[in-house]
Amino acid sequence: MTRRTIADRYEKAAANLLRQHGAQATWTEARYWRAAIAYVPERHLYSPRPRDCRTFYLFCHELAHIALDHRYLGPHMGMQDEMEADVWAVRRLKRLRGWVPQSVRSMLIRRGLRLAESALQHGCAMPDCLNALAKALR
């Protein structure tokens, strides 16, 4: 499969997901975590254009907040909501590709470790969704 065909496949899958969840997207240029955000009540997200596995994952993570009806609580959303969005996005990526590429897997492992460390530092119980994420990555 050519690079163009792969990019087209990600974009088509993203368009289908937007339609399915009644959401709209504005594409951003940046390709990192803080370049994406979802506005749940407005059903609108800002995300890098999904043209590879990583940007498709970022898009799906933000769409998950809309699909799961998470309420935006500012830059420090609850760990539970973030992990639920991660699991939802991993499942969509696996549905499209059949597996989770190492670049996304590594990103999620680092992210999960940071969230677990934060929970331990603040005396919070480890959320069940960490187990769900580990299971989704298998």
Image (cartoon, rainbow, N blue to C red):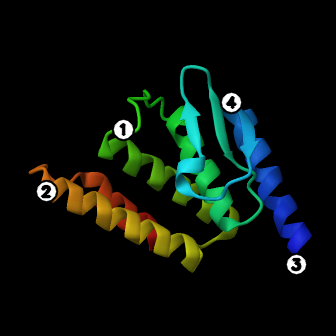
Tag in front: 3 or 1? 1
Q: Nearer the viewer, residue 118 or 104?
A: 118
Tag in front: 2 or 3? 2
Question: For residue 23, which numbered disc appears in the image?
Answer: 4
Circle 2 residue: 121
Sequence-first disc among 3 and 4:
3
Residue name at image x 14 percent, y 58 percent: 120
Residue name at image x 90 percent, y 68 percent: 5
**Element under label 4?**
loop
Q: Amino acid at mark 1?
A: Met
- In the picture shown, does residue 34 fall above or below 40? below
Circle 1 residue: 77
Q: Amino acid at mark 4?
A: Ala
In the displayed image of the protein, which residue is found farthest to the top? 41
**Element under label 2?**
helix
Give percent across and percent down for residue 122.
13, 50
Circle 3 residue: 1
Residue 53: name its quadrant: bottom right
Sequence-first disc among 2 and 4:
4
- Mark 1 residue crowding within 10 angstroms, few (<14) / some (14–19) / many (20+): few
Q: Amino acid at mark 3?
A: Met
Tag in front: 1 or 4? 1
**Element under label 1?**
loop
Gap between marks 3 and 4 measured at Cα: 29 Å
Gap between marks 2 and 1 measured at Cα: 17 Å
Left or right position of 134 against 101: left
Left or right position of 1 against 43: right
Left or right position of 124 against 17: left
Residues at discs 2 and 4 in contact (Cβ within 8 Å): no
